[in-house]
Image: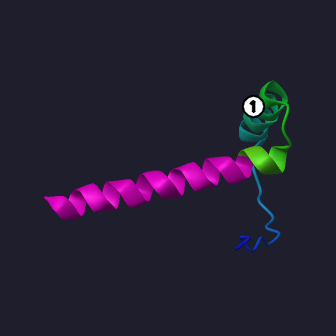
């Protein structure tokens, strides 16, 4: 089943935006793609961290 996607607006300071734009250009991807992958990675990391904390 395909994942539902929703449009989200984000506000970034100029330094962060510059970094995201550079990353998007390096990967030949859109800014929205890079931001979505960053968010997904952070959520996975948080989930893994919570699992490992629960194991202790």
| The residue positioned farthest toward the top in the image shown | 26
| The residue positioned farthest toward the left in the image shown | 56
Residue for point 79% across, 67% down: 8
Callout 1 secondary element:
helix
Q: How many residues crowd around disc 1 within 10 Å: few (fewer than 14), some, or many (20 or more)?
A: some
* In-image side of 29 versus 35 (left or right): right
- Spot occupied by residue 23 in the image (x, y as percentages of width and height): 75, 31
Decide: is 13 above or below 46. above
Task: Name the quadrant of the N terminus.
Answer: bottom right
Please check the rendered image and state whether residue 52 is part of the magenta-colored stretch, yes or no: yes
* In-image side of 53 versus 6 (left or right): left
| The residue positioned farthest toward the front in the image shown | 1
Decide: is 18 above or below 6. above
Decide: is 17 above or below 9. above
Q: Quadrant of residue 55?
A: bottom left
- Spot occupied by residue 28 in the image (x, y as percentages of width and height): 85, 31
Residue for point 75% across, 37% down: 20
In this rendered view, identify the residue nearer to me: 12 or 55: 55
Decide: is 20 above or below 38. above
Total label count?
1
Please report the bounds of the magenta region as a residue range.
35-56
Residue for point 81% across, 51% down: 32
Task: Name the quadrant of the C terminus.
Answer: bottom left
Q: Which residue is mark 1?
A: 23
Residue for point 79% across, 72% down: 6
Magenta: predominant secondary structure element? helix
Please check the rendered image and state whether residue 1 is part of the magenta-colored stretch, yes or no: no
Figure coloring: rainbow
- Spot occupied by residue 11 in the image (x, y as percentages of width and height): 77, 56
């Amino acid at each position: 089943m395909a994942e539902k996607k929703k449009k989200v607006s984000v506000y970034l300071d100029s330094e962060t935006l510059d970094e995201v734009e550079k990353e998007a250009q390096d990967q030949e991807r859109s800014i929205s793609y890079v931001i979505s992958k960053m968010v997904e990675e952070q959520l996975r990391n948080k989930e893994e961290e919570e699992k490992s904390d629960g194991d202790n």
